[in-house]
């Protein structure tokens, strides 16, 4: 839970100024430091970014009545319906979450290479 | 083992990041695009734009107050010219930056830089046509005109101050899709935009088809089918006007013209881009003062080609539409005057043959001497490829657009260029700064100011209609018209003989014009400019007369006209073409030969009222019928893959049907039997019914014209999903409401002159160029239903009667 919250919060702050791939760096470092298992590393990073991005997407698109997201759906060859934006929303969040998840996983295994006592101190 | 695992996952995650941050073909860098913090989601604007904002602006001389009305039209209140155009640049960029960038790149032949090798031939074409050469000449002329240079620079400063304020997450969505960054705006970009308008409106030519026709059919047939005076003509300057000037003597037609030429390969030119404008005198209006109307027809796209703006300084107060990328108002009104433009089809583009001395192509023949060519090297940067250097040869006439084997087969717009010919085109010249015309019209107070403003204009030539609150109305076909002998440039010209050169310019005050004519109105619909008494040759091919006839008929009987009667006229769908053709068509169909569904269709079209209203089934049948008939008559004679030609003008077909029913052209030369007019008419009728049935099923509601014609207004770069919904209105190319395919009334304006002008207008789009804005297409519905918005002509920024949604104060710093 701590890992999840930390990834979510620091990704949010860094993404205000820095490119999207900060989520990979954040997930990698924090998982290397804090994750206790590969499962936890992947899940915490995955869900942190999924939820963060979902929230920001909704914050942007709902006041817009999803006009733009529906247009973008057609740009990606989806049919012109009132709900096509949901597909774009899910793809955005899912891709971001997967990048974060695998970065977390890579971070966890990298963390395993560090001297034992440092790793256990942090855990 | 641990190391391998760690390394494997690290590499996998890294590759994932890199792949999702890279553009592949047409697919944008996926996660950069889908990222909610800086990707496209940031372009989703919340509903109404409102609130107020203070911005510190570098370079501004004094403070500027900008208020936006409910349609997001900016009303700019500045204290001096510099600030007014700076603010115009700033605000236009804020809402139309990508459009400005894209249109400039298109015109300058710089699309490959951002889209890659696919655009190379298009870029080469633009450059070989001399777009850069023309734009640079305009910039040179600008050096001699400090006043105009100052306003074009002020506009650029404003655009750049907006661009500098952007961070990548605020870039317009198209930059994110195509994955490139906006670059700073250069004054020459304004020149490119103006050259693009010349290319669109005065860049057509069909000398090559004409020369081919001459070669195949000889002089008599060519003159007969392609006359200089069209059937039932109704010129812009009313017939019988006396020309009160002493003309320069026109040169005589040299012996041996036109030449028989080598084969040139072309495709058919699309029928005219048109427009309407008219002004009625106070004697025809309810108010006692003039009303002026204009609806320019252009390719319709989103974002729209127009951007509405009001510019207010202590010396000027003007409202109208501007072209994103150029300062000033192009069509509009101020306190005292209103003006509107339509395109003039005069011939300002000719092709000259080039005779090189030898294969080195260093010298060409002119006046029995060998002159040196000039070479201009065009450097085209290509995204993801090597930079290309393309050398273009220039003679004294202009660029040799394509030499042998240079013309790309797959580029449609290049097919009307005759290989090996030099291009003489008015868009390459810059005798003056065209923007000055709009600068002075924006400030005009009366007829004299209007006439003076017009003298600065060269291309693309336009019919400038005018009205003021002193009850003067006028129309002038204005631009740089070369002095030519009769039919000079109707066919290809021999470039080695000086007698074929343009012989200077028709003095601008002798351009066709009329002030306060007896008929109490002026009008134009791209038809022929004058009758045959005008002392100069201007060209032979103009838009058909159908729209002009309808306009003039309505205006002749118009009395006590109001804004609303003018508005209804702009939306009028009646077809004079149908009126002319229908009696002949109907009387030449033998009803005994018709199937049940053909009989039903015949019944419908016979009862049709000749209005192309969206609910009319007869309109759909007639439209396809007459188009098929045209093919039936001409295709066998004029469609030759070895010798491409064009069809005669529409008016010539009508004349054939009405006056020459036994003409040999009705016979299909590819069949053994002899076809008559009746055969052609019946065959094309059956074809029309059959094609409607196949596409829309049995006759019924789906055959209605609105449905048959319906299509969306597309995005400027045809990006899927970024267009409008389907447009279901009426109209046709022969109606005042000139809707056809993807072009139609791109702006409708009605202005009643008075103590203060009152204006109404609408264009099919919205002020914002952002597909994620509510203001992207909010005016489409109003336009489609034939309504107009009130144009708020404000005197002060705090006017109570106008609903202000947003205020932006630009503070000088």
Image (spheres, coloured by chain):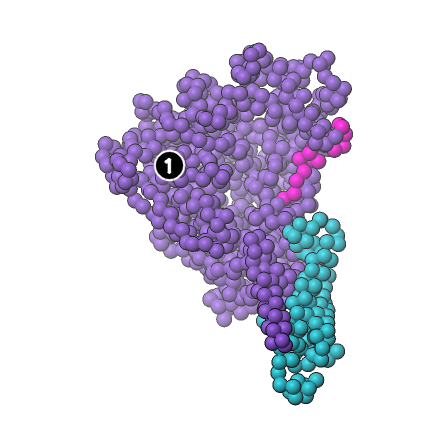
Q: What is the residue that sits farthest to the left in this orientation?
A: B369
Q: Which of the pair B257/B531 is nearer the observer?
A: B257
- In the rendered image of this protein, does residue B208 appear above or below residue B108? above
Q: Which of the pair B640/B474 is nearer the observer?
A: B640
Q: Measuring 44% from the left and 19% from the top, which residue is drawn there?
A: B217
* Residue B540, x across and y down, in percent: 45, 28
Viewport quadrant of the N terminus of chain B: bottom right
Q: Secondary structure at mark 1?
A: loop
* Residue B627, x across and y down, in percent: 60, 26
Q: Measuring 63% from the left and 21% from the top, which residue is drawn there?
A: B684
* Residue B176, x across and y down, in percent: 58, 59
Q: What is the residue that sits farthest to the front in this orientation?
A: B1
Residue A63 can be seen in this image: no
Which residues are the magenta region?
Answer: B698-713
Residue B406 can be seen in this image: yes
Identify by letter the chain in cyan: A
Q: Measuring 72% from the left and 64% from the top, which residue is drawn there?
A: A58
Residue placed under numbered mark 1 in the picture: B404
The chain that hosts pointer 1 is: B
Q: Colour of chain B?
A: purple
């Amino acid at each position: 839970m701590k890992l999840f919250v930390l990834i979510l919060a620091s990704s949010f702050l860094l993404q205000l100024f820095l490119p999207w791939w900060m989520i990979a760096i954040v997930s990698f470092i924090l998982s290397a430091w804090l994750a206790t298992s590969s499962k936890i590393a992947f899940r915490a990073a995955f869900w942190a970014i999924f939820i963060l991005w979902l929230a920001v997407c909704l914050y942007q698109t709902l006041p817009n009545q999803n006009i733009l997201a529906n247009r973008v759906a057609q740009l990606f060859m989806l049919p012109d319906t009132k709900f096509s934006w949901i597909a774009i929303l899910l793809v955005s969040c899912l891709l971001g979450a997967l990048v974060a998840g695998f970065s977390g996983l890579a971070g966890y295994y990298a963390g395993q290479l560090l001297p034992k006592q440092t790793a256990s101190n942090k855990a | 083992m641990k190391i391998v695992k760690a390394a494997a996952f690290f590499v996998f995650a890294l590759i994932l990041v890199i792949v999702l941050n890279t553009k592949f073909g047409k697919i944008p860098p996926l996660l950069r695009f889908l990222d909610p913090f800086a990707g496209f989601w940031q372009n989703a604007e919340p509903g109404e734009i409102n609130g107020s904002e203070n911005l510190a602006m570098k370079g501004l001389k004094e403070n500027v107050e900008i208020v936006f009305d409910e349609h997001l039209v900016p009303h700019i209140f500045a204290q001096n010219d510099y600030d007014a155009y700076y603010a115009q640049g700033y605000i236009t960029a804020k809402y139309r930056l990508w459009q400005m960038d894209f249109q400039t790149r298109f015109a300058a032949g710089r699309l490959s830089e951002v889209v890659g090798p696919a655009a190379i031939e298009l870029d080469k074409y633009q450059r070989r046509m001399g777009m850069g050469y023309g734009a640079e000449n305009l910039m040179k002329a600008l050096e001699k005109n400090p006043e105009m240079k100052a306003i074009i620079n002020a506009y650029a400063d404003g655009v750049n101050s907006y661009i500098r304020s952007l961070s990548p997450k605020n870039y317009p969505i198209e930059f994110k899709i195509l994955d490139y960054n906006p670059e700073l705006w250069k004054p020459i970009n304004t020149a490119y935009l103006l050259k693009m308008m010349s290319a669109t409106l005065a860049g057509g030519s069909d000398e090559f088809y004409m020369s081919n026709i001459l070669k195949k059919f000889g002089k008599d047939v060519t003159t007969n089918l392609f006359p200089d005076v069209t059937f039932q003509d109704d010129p812009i300057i009313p017939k019988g006007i006396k020309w009160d000037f002493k003309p320069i003597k026109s040169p005589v037609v040299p012996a041996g013209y036109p030449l028989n030429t080598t084969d040139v390969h072309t495709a058919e030119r699309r029928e005219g881009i048109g427009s309407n404008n008219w002004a009625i005198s106070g004697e025809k209006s309810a108010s006692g003062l003039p009303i002026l109307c204009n609806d320019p027809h252009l390719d319709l796209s989103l974002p729209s080609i127009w951007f509405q703006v009001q510019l207010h300084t202590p010396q000027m107060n003007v409202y109208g539409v501007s072209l994103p990328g150029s300062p000033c108002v192009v069509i509009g009104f101020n306190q005292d005057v209103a003006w509107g433009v339509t395109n003039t089809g005069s011939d300002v583009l000719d092709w000259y043959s080039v005779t090189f001395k030898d294969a080195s192509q260093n010298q060409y023949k002119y006046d029995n001497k060998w002159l040196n060519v000039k070479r201009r090297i065009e450097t085209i940067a290509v995204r993801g490829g090597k930079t290309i250097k393309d050398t273009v040869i220039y003679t004294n006439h202009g660029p040799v657009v394509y030499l042998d084997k240079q013309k790309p087969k797959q580029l449609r717009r290049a097919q009307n260029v005759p290989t090996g010919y030099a291009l003489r085109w008015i868009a390459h010249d810059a005798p003056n700064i065209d923007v000055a015309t709009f600068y002075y019209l924006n400030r005009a107070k009366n007829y004299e100011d209007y006439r003076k403003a017009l003298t600065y204009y060269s291309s693309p030539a336009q019919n400038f209609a005018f009205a003021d609150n002193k009850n003067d109305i006028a129309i002038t076909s204005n631009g740089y018209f070369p002095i030519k002998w009769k039919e000079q440039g109707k066919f290809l010209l021999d470039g080695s003989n000086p007698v074929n050169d343009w012989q200077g310019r028709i003095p601008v005050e002798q351009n066709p014009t009329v002030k306060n004519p007896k008929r109490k109105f002026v009008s134009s619909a791209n038809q022929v400019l004058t009758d045959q008494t005008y002392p100069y040759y201007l060209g032979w091919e103009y838009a058909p007369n159908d729209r002009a006839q309808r306009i003039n008929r309505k205006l002749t009987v118009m009395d006590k006209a109001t804004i609303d009667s003018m508005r209804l006229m702009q939306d009028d769908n009646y077809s004079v073409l149908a009126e002319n053709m229908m009696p002949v068509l109907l009387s030449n169909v033998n009803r005994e030969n018709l199937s049940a569904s053909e009989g039903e269709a015949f019944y419908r079209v016979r009862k049709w009222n000749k209005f192309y209203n969206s609910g009319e089934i007869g309109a759909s049948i007639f439209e396809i019928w007459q188009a098929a008939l045209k093919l039936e008559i001409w295709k066998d004679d004029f469609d030759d893959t070895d010798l491409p030609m064009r069809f005669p003008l529409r008016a010539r077909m009508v004349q054939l049907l009405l006056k020459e029913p036994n003409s040999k052209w009705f016979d299909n030369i590819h069949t053994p039997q002899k076809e008559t007019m009746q055969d052609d008419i019946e065959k094309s009728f059956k074809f029309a019914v059959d094609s409607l049935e196949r596409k829309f099923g049995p006759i019924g509601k789906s055959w209605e014209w609105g449905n048959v014609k319906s299509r969306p207004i597309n995005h400027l770069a045809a990006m899927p999903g970024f267009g409008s919904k389907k447009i279901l209105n009426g109209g046709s190319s022969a109606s005042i409401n000139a809707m056809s395919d993807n072009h139609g009334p791109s702006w409708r304006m009605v202005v009643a002159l008075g103590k203060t002008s009152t204006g109404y207008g609408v264009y099919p789009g919205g002020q914002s160029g952002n597909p994620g804005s509510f203001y992207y297409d909010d005016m489409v519905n109003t336009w489609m239903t034939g309504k107009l918005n009130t144009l708020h002509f404000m005197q002060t920024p705090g006017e109570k009667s106008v609903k202000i949604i947003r205020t932006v104060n630009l503070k000088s710093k």
